[in-house]
């Protein structure tokens, strides 16, 4: 895929990546240890290219695979930070983003878009436990999409319910709010808005 266009299958894989990237974080608070001014950050690649990531001009991660690869979380000093993505063998920034990282908060730096229009966004996560079950939210990372319907059903359910669990806005608009769902073995299906 070298023309920047996405197949239906690749687009759906990016939509599902959004589930993983800005989905559930049910992390318990840390006990003990020394207080330090750090936040916690990971990179996610929803683009069609293998990418290198940089923080404040220095290499941070090399060779993150396309269409769904996510790094582990790592600590980073709090305060203003700049992020950039580059092609694996490139020397020019493809997309950039900035954020003011806050102590004890979690972030995902998401690379997405097409080869011709790469994009990047810093997403702040929630790191407290949900009341019960899981907490999820969505971001539409499918270029050209006018909206998505997301269905959560029990794994054994073969038909779609009449109403989607989530309705997600158009490509590259605001991230949806977190919602809590029961902790089940969910089957997750994504359709274009208006389709089932």
Image (cartoon, helix red, strand yellow):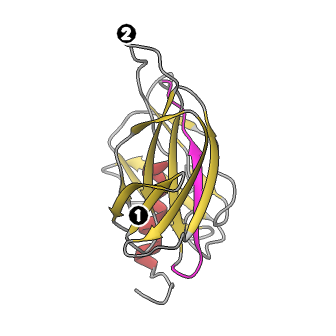
- Residue at far top of view: 32
Give 134 or 25, whichever is nearer the viewer.
25
Q: Going 56% across and 33% down the picture, which residue do you hit?
A: 78
Task: Please tell me whether residue 121 belongs to the stretch shown in magenta.
Answer: yes
Q: Which residue is mark 1?
A: 52
Q: Residue at x 64, y 51 (%)?
A: 98
Residue 107 visible in the shown view: yes
Cα separation between marks 1 and 2:
34 Å
Residue 119 among magenta residues = yes
Ranked by sequence position, the earlier of labels 1 and 2 is 2
Q: Is residue 103 above or below residue 19?
A: above
Q: What residue range appears in magenta?
A: 115-128
How many labels sit on residues? 2
Rendered position, 21 above or below 45: above
Dividing the picture into quarters, in which one does residue 50 lie?
bottom left
Residue tagged 2 = 32
């Amino acid at each position: 895929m070298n023309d920047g266009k996405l197949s239906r299958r690749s687009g759906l894989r990016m939509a599902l990546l959004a589930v993983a990237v800005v989905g559930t974080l049910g992390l318990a608070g840390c006990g003990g240890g020394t207080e330090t001014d750090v936040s916690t950050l990971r990179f996610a690649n929803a683009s069609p290219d293998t990418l290198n990531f940089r923080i404040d001009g220095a290499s941070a991660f090399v060779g993150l695979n396309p269409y769904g690869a996510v790094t582990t979380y790592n600590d980073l000093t709090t305060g203003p930070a700049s992020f950039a993505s580059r092609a694996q063998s490139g020397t020019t920034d493809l997309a950039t983003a900035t954020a003011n990282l806050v102590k004890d908060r979690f972030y995902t730096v998401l690379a997405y878009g097409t080869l011709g229009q790469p994009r990047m966004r810093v997403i702040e996560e929630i790191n407290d436990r949900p009341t019960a079950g899981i907490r999820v939210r969505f971001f539409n990372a499918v270029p050209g999409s006018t909206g998505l319907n997301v269905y959560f059903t029990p794994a054994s359910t073969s038909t779609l319910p009449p109403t989607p669990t989530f309705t997600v806005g158009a490509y590259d608009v605001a991230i949806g709010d977190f919602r809590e769902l029961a902790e089940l073995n969910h089957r997750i299906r994504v359709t274009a808005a208006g389709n089932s």
